[in-house]
Image: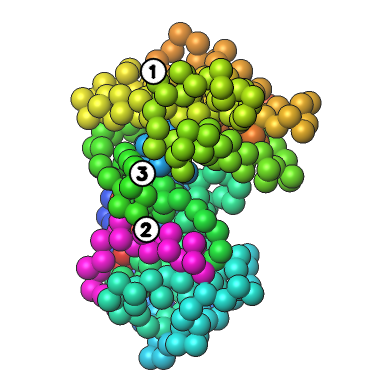
Amino acid sequence: MNVEKLVEYINEGSLDERLEAVYGKSDVAFQRNRYASAADEFARIYGKDRDVSLFSVSGRSELSGNHTDHNHGCVIAASINLDIIAVASLRDDKIIRVKSEGFPEDCVDISAYSSPKSEKFGTSESIIAGMCAGFLKDGYAVGGFDAYTTSNVLKGSGLSSSAAFEDMIGNILNHSYNGGVVDNIEIAKLAQYAENEFFGKPCGLMDQVACAAGGIVAIDFADPKNPVIDKLSFDISGAGYNLCIVNTGGNHADLTDDYASVPREMKAVASALGCEVLRGTDEENIIASVPALRGKVGDRALMRALHFFEENKRVEKQKEALLAGDIDKFFEGVIASGRSSFCYLQNVYTTKNLEEQGLSLALCLTDIFLAGKRAAWRVHGGGFAGTIQAFVHENDVEEYRRLMDSAFGEGKCIVLRIRPEGALKVF
């Protein structure tokens, strides 16, 4: 269908059933306008007579396993109902053009850009080229296309806007040139390859998997090249709970060393025990070695290492709780994870600016507001600044939103649902 007819098709409600399946009934009108506007923008940039398809890739939220994946640990993560959408049309050459809302157009000749270029590290061009190289490496087809994308996965929110973009390029290639046969987990692995080799960032795999897979997933990174991924079918939204992400508006400047210190210190403990990562040793060995290790790695590193092992055990218990439909046990693990992150992992505020503790304040207010209620809360993502998460019952969510918005600014509390589908072709 050409883009002009597609806009009519969307506006008359013909796509509503599909939109409801992906986003939920209450979100259909918003998504109808959003997709129609994206198609109009594609037509303005690339022409109204082009035949097009629609694609979506969700953002993600880490539910448990705070700072464990980089030491080959375990996590639980989920796709959410914020996403990046794309309107795309095939070309008959090897040029890929992507215009993302708010950013300059990327134009990549994938026949010429087929191996990593250090001067392109850190650019979206490198992601596009890397995804194509990854597809070819694994025996899949690639080709040119034009795409317009828009995203409500906010940058800096800890919801993985960059991983969603990577998965989106793979999603378009999958359905446009491979008949949709490439599994979403394989797309996630290729996204990691693109980010590691072409973008120049040694990232893990959690973000890409959680954005692509859909629903809730438990991931064990004991073998990071072949992680064990289990889909968990529990419906948190169906149980009456919203996932609230509170953006405290903290300053992310000069936090690079804070973030890097967590894996660095964990790996220092592992190295002192003759291992590359903590998954190569165990908690008992570390506890027995505390007297010898304190002077070598420092007390904080030891606490962070012990957090790693306790967090892995929590993830396993929370996985079992979700499989059994026991939301109380799951929530118990969420709160324990948050307390461990605050006390032992120590990633809730930076020691460089002790007066700015937005995450601490948000957790404190949440603790008071939700005290005695069936709910759960914790730091979200990397920490130090940014966001917390809270599982809040639908009966309490509007009052909680008002409290958080009054403290941190209008719109800072984002009320989400777990989305059952991750990367998909919408039309």
Q: Amino acid at mark 2?
A: Ala
Which secondary structure lies at badge 1? Answer: helix
Over which residues does the magenta segment extend? 177-198
Q: Amino acid at mark 1?
A: Glu
Residue at 57% over, 13% down: 368
Nearest to N terminus: mark 3 or mark 1: 3
Which color scheme did the rendering employ for the protein? rainbow
- What residue did someone put label 2 on? 188
Nearest to N terminus: mark 1 or mark 2: 2
Comparing marks 2 and 3, which lies closer to the viewer?
3
The answer to if 12 sits in the magenta stretch is no
Which secondary structure lies at badge 3? Answer: loop
Point out the image quarter for the C terminus: bottom left
Label 2–label 3 contact, CB within 8 A: no
- What residue did someone put label 3 on? 221
Crowding at dot 3, Cα within 10 Å, few <14 / some 14-19 / many 20+, comes out as: many
Which secondary structure lies at badge 2? Answer: helix
